[in-house]
Each structure stands twice: as C-alpha cells, then as structure tokens.
Amino acid sequence: MASVKLDNIQKTYPNGFKAIHGVDVDVQDGEFLVLVGPSGCGKSTLLRMIAGLETVTGGELEIGDKVVNDLEPSKRDIAMVFQNYALYPHMTVYNNMAYGLKIMGLSKSEIDERVKNAAGILELTDEQLTRKPRELSGGQRQRVAMGRAIVRKPSVFLFDEPLSNLDAKLRVQMRVEIKRLQESLGITSIYVTHDQVEAMTLGHRLMVLNSGVVEQLGTPIELYERPASLFVAEFIGSPAMNILDTKISEDGESVDIATNIGLALGNGGLPDYAGKKVKLGVRPEHLQLAEGSENSLPLTVTLVEHLGADTLVHGHFGEDETDMTVRRSGTLKTVPGDKLPISITRENIHLFDAETSRRIDL
Amino acid sequence: MLKRVHFGPSALPYLLVLPQILVTVIFFIWPASQALYQSLLVEDAFGLSSKFVWFENFEYLFEDPYYWGSFQRTFVFSFLVASLSMGSALLLAVMADRVVKGSGLYRTFLIWPYAVAPAAAGALWFFMFNPTLGILPYVLQFIGYDWNHKVNGTEAMALVIFAASWKQIAYNFLFFLAGLQSIPKSLIEAAAIDGAGPGRRFWTIVFPLLSPTTFFLLVINVVYAFFETFGIVDAITSGGPANSTQILVYKVYNDGFVGLDLGGSAAQSVILMGIVIGLTVIQFRFVEKKVSYND
C-alpha cells in the first residue's frame, strides 16, 4: 500500500519534444486514478514514467514517500498490466505468474501458494495454468496478465489500456472485474485509457490530459457537471456536448442562443464578458422538448438514431444551421425533416471563454 | 477456410514452371545422377577404361582411416564455425539492437563481409596471417608467439575456422537482428518490472524467443561449413599442412581432381549429398513446424 505523488513531473525527449508539461497529482493510498485523453496526449508516457520505463526529465516522483526518479522499475514496488498483455509466450501460465516471484527468491511453496491464490481470485483453472498463453482466449490472457501483477503484491498497480484489445462485451465484463478487484485488494491503481466510459466507471478520480497538459483533475461527476475547459466538456460524455459559438449580450445579462433568442443568466450576469464572444455548451440529455413554448428553438431533424432505451436526434437550427444533438430517454417518434421545438435551461449550460477555452463560472 | 479453386486444363502452369524444372534437371538431377553412377565405377587415372564394381568404392571409403579423419575434422570445423559465427553475430546483433543513432550505417558495415567472395576472403586472411608477410604473426611475435600455420596443423585449422566464421557472421547477424526486433518491447519491459536484470532477461526471455531463428541458422551454418567453405580452405591452406584442414568437401576435390580417383571422389560426394538431404529434412520438419512461438 502506498501513495503516489507527482510533483511538477515533466518529460522532454532528446529531440526537444516536450511530451509532459509539469503534472502535479497526489494519488491517495488505495485510490483508483484514471489518466484519460486522446491518442498522443502523453498519458501512456506519464504511466511509463511512473513505472520507470521512461526517464523523468523534470520534477519529483514519489511512491510511498520515497523519491523514485532514478530507481529501477523492479525497485519501485509496482506491477504493470500492458495493453498487449506482454505474457511470456514460451512459458506456461503458471510460470508467467511465477517468473517475478522466482526472481524475488521466494520459496517454491510460497510461490505456489501465491500463484494458486491469484488463479483462484481470477477464476483460472488448474488446467489453464499449465497452458501456454497462445492457447488462451483474449479475456483469459487478460486475466493472466492481471494475475502476474497480483502475485507480486505490489504497492501500486499500473494499467496501460488493458482492455483495448478485447471485444466490446468482454471489455464491459473485465471492466467490472477490474473495479471489483481493485476495491477488494485496495491497492493504489493508476489506469490509462482513451475510453471515457471506462474512465468514468473505473476511476475515483480522473485526470484529463491534452498534449501533455492536465486539463482537469477531479471525480467523474465533477468532470461531467463542471468541466474546467472546452476540451474536457467535449471529451467527457457520449454523445459529446453540443457547442454553440455565441456571445454575451451588450448588457451582460444574457447569452444569445440564436437570432433574437437570448437566455437570461441571472445572478448579476457576466458584466466582464458583455458583448464578448463565448462558447456555450449543453449536453444532449439536457435539452428539453418544449411543445408550444414561445422561447423554443425549432430544430430541423436530419437523422434519428433509436438506441432502444434512448433516442438520439441530430438536427440543426437557426440561420447558420448550427448542428445539435438531442438525447431523449424512451422512444421518440420523429423523422428527418420534422421540426422539433427544443428549449435550453440556464442550469444546464456551460460557458467557455472563446479565447482561452476555460470555463466561465456563473 | 479457403475453398480450393479449380481451373480448366491449360498449358500455362506447365510453361511457367518449365524454366525452374529445366534448371533443376540440368544443374542438379543430371550431375547428381552422374555422380551416383560414377560412384559405382572404378576408372583408371587416364579415363580409358572403367569397371562397374557396385559398392566397392563405399566399402573402401568406410575402411579408410583418412576418410574418417576428414569426417571428424569436418565435424569439429563445422561445430566451431557455427558456434563462433553465430555467437559473435548474436553478440553484435544484441548490441546493434540497442544502437539508436547511426544504426543504419552500423548495420551496413556489418553486412559487408557477406558480399566478399569466399576466395577473396581466403586471400585476405592468407595475407593477414602469412607467416612471413602477415601483420598478425608480426604482432604475435611481440608477445612471444611464433605463428606458422604452414607447418602447424592446429594453427591452420584455427585460421580456416576464423576465416569461414568471419564470412558467415554478417548473414547470421541479419537474421538475429530481425529476430530481436520482432520480440515485442513490452515483454522486455514486463521482465524488467518483474525484477530481471539485463543478463537474466536475455537468457530467460530473449534467447528462448530467438530459438526458431537460432535453430534455422544452426542448420544453415552447418550446411555452409560443410559445403561452402571450399574456396576459403583452398585459398588459405589447400587442405594442408599434412591434410590437417582437409574437410570432406575439400577431400572430394582433392581425391577426384588431384588424386584422379574419380569413383572414390564420386562416392564421397554421394555421401555429402545424403548429409545435405538429411539436414534439409531436419530444417523442414523442425524449423518450419515445431520450433515456433508465433501465435
């Protein structure tokens, strides 16, 4: 058990490319932190730096109150699960799990006990332990990779997109298992993914990375309800948040939604932004249908997607044909070409500075 | 599963394989059958008369201590050439695998010896180790070692082994490097996290995963040492001194074209042919099927 502390961690490659621009985070003992972001955002690099597979070129990295910047991966008391599982193909499943233990110099009986114990937790049969990794299915290999991490009894688990090679159904199943396992073992875990659903469901806290910069660090609900930047707003949530290019009225009291339609901000408005351009975000699930309301926007439906539990309606409105997606639970009977009156409520909008893309608090 | 595709009868497939069949018949089947036939004959040195003697040539060979001596030498020679060239190639490949800057240049230089003709390579080593002119005997003199492979059989053997290995290193290097680069980096990283140091990682992870390459190269190198080192032996020692570097393939030439014992020489080449066929079978049986770690 250990905490992990990143203090202004930076990574600059020899060719001058700066992959990580100073990351600060304090991962509590037993916490599940998810690093999430699009490809190339630096999340894997950051994880590999924690593992000791990449050098840290700036800042201080602590695992369990010990600075580990220059420590070998094996001395950091961590275990890592790789995207491609990285199982040793020439060894049996048993030996794959026992490899690190043998190097630790544990006794045969101790190794056997730990491997059998891990196999029990992961529901691997004795027969499967004698097989080679290539004779296992993707999900079973994933379990073996987890097993190899568990038997080491590390202070910190590191996961590098462990589910991305699995099919959709198995991914959901393994996601639940990882969550359950982490909670029962209580081991500090850092998990990298590009899948925001995985991130939202697994993490106690999420760190959204973009081009090596931390966009936001917070609980899943915080990220969903109060995204700190336009990037986080668009990244978290599916389908993505609707973003409108608009501006604050000259008196700062309201925000323009469409020509002649404004939304009162209340709370004294935003005098600092009076007349300035802003971006307005509203999630598809927060758009209301407003039959007969005067202040509704007429959405011209272009495409309807029936998901069963929900209906997604894609359309556009206004002179500049701003695209918008609406999500309604249940079945909504509408066809392309229809005009749906929709309304936006003040509580559900997010405003972002058009220049800095940061959140504007009302 | 792919379904078998049926084509109508046509002369085209036969036409397409015809050149290959012609080459095989003219340059392999014909000479090989000639050798087989020749091995059953005894011919006088002038080629004026010949007599069919069944397997007498073979019987004579198997009773000949010189032939067994040559056999033994060939095994020692092949074993040492294969281990030396594969060992050095593996070492170089492991180091080249780690090189980040200028790796292209480094590799190109390492591949060059392969482009040198065996006789030219032999001549190169001949001059370097020439007891009177060579640079290396001159250097060895300073540490009090008197090198003369023209009289010392062991030194002569060592020299042809060096020369033959040197030429094969480039080839082995290429295959080892490709083998090393096909091992996923994450495996090495996983082993590092598991606490294995570089040496342990190499012997427990990398080396076992290279075994298909190693086995393939072993067969190739043995075949090379058996059959393709003629030029090197001829240029450096011509089998001497006192037959100490006369390996099987050289003895075929020596007995046939110098000793003019055509029947005996043909019998020897038939035995060599048998060895090649054996090695090729091993190659196909084991390399292509058994020793594979690919999914």
Image: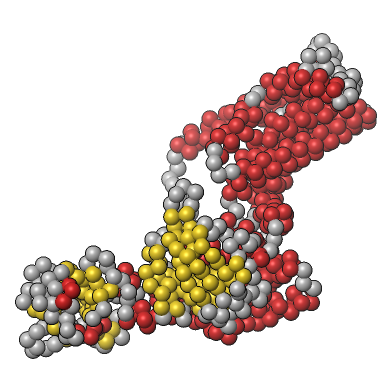
Q: Position of residue B103 (x, y in %)?
A: 56, 39
Asked which quadrant contains residue B231, the reply is top right
Q: Is residue A307 left or right of residue B238?
A: left
Front residue (pair B63, A84):
A84
Name the image quarter holding residue B31: top right
**Residue B243 on image: x %, y %:** 88, 23
Residue A294 in view of the camera: yes
Picture coordinates of residue B132, whole percent (x, y)? 82, 14
Of residues B230 and A108, the one drawn nearer to the viewer in this rendering: A108
Residue found at x 9% / y 84%? A295
In the rendered image, the vertical position of residue A294 relative to residue B73, given as above or below: below
Instruction: Examine the rendering and report whether any part of residue B60 can be seen.
Output: no
Left or right side of A214 for A107:
right
Q: From what the image shows, is residue B136 above or below residue B17?
A: above
* Residue B194 picture quarter: bottom right
Q: Residue at x 80, y 73 (%)?
A: A107
| Foreground of the two, B123 or B273 | B123
Q: How is the image coloured?
A: secondary structure
Which residue is located at x 63 percent, y 67 percent? A76
Q: Residue at 43% across / 52% down in the picture? A: A17
Q: Is residue B72 above or below residue A321?
A: above
Quadrant location of the C terminus of chain A in the rendered image = bottom left
